[in-house]
Image: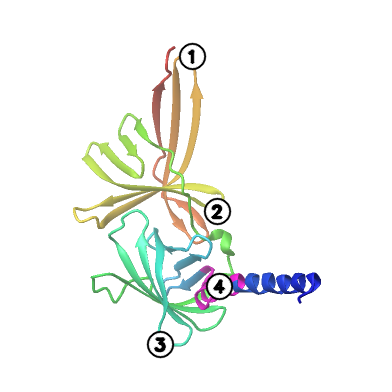
Amino acid sequence: MMYPRSRAFLFVILLFLLSGISVFAQNTPADRFKSRLDGAWVKKEKDGSSTIINYNYSSNDIIMFSDAMGVQEVYLCSQFSPTVRENTWYLLGTNDMVPFIRMNITVRLESDNVCHFTVREEGIKNEGIIWNGKYERMTEYGEKKAPKEEKQFVLDGKYESDTMTLVFSKHNFTLTDEKGDKSGLAALYDFGDISILELRFLGKEGKLESLLQYKFERSITENDDVIIVEITMLPGKIKIHGFKPSGEPKLVLTQKIAKETE
């Protein structure tokens, strides 16, 4: 006959074992590797510029940023799997804005502060891609300087100035000026303590043809019958120490939204 106290003791042991299973299930080899990879990694180039790869463990995405080229790309990670080489894992990165652009990424951790990345666009031979090479954990400038994508996009609608018109529909945009119409994808994100608007002009196959970056500010005023949204765009380029204006004049565009009448 089993006494109630013995049954209670066995029940406690069972709960402990079950909780342990949950803990061990979360502490897989993949989780441990992702935890070590978490954060920003920097590679100094011969011309003095830098490239940054920032892996975010919590959101499982990679941001690739080139200081010299002023390019930032965000890839959502999947197929995280080990390779036959020690401390080396493979993952597939899918572009968050152009899903059919995918990167095959191999990551080898030499130590907690040194990491080797090999990145190739799927289906394209590009041995000289800028993201390849040896990276060191980003400590000199701190992780606060790493680019950070803002998930919410709030610019839907038509914005006008005397010289140009910008129409946003979610992440898509069309720019009209004296040269005609151009379209592509827009990204709005934080870099340090400022906001950056990035306009990516795409070709017929969805490949990046050119890119413009602006320090971005937005204000809203209203009167009795209309809401006025004003956006200010200062042309420039992101550098490792922050945003550097190009010297071109800033652009000011407005959107007028009529208030609904009862």
Q: Earlier in the sequence, mark 4 or mark 1?
A: 4
Q: Quadrant of residue 208?
A: bottom left
The quadrant the C terminus occupies is top left
- Disc 2: CA contacts within 10 A as few (<14), some (14-19) or many (>=20): some
Q: Residue furthest front?
A: 1
Residue ID at (55%, 53%): 192
How far apart marks 3 and 4 lie (CA) works out to: 23 Å
Quickly name the residue at label 3. Answer: 84
Quickly name the residue at label 1. Answer: 224
**Left or right: where does residue 246 sit relative to residue 146?**
left
Mark in the foreground, 3 or 4: 4
Q: Quadrant of residue 5?
A: bottom right
* Membership of 212 in magenta stretch: no
How far apart marks 2 and 4 lie (CA) works out to: 36 Å
What amino acid is found at the position of numbered circle 3 in the picture?
Answer: Val
Secondary structure under tag 2 reads: loop
Quickly name the residue at label 2. Answer: 192
**Left or right: where does residue 48 sit relative to residue 9?**
left
Q: Earlier in the sequence, mark 2 or mark 1?
A: 2
Residue ID at (45%, 23%): 227
How far apart marks 2 and 1 lie (CA) works out to: 37 Å
Secondary structure under tag 3 reads: loop
Mark in the foreground, 2 or 4: 4
Q: Is residue 152 above or below residue 242?
A: above
Image: magenta residue range: 22-40
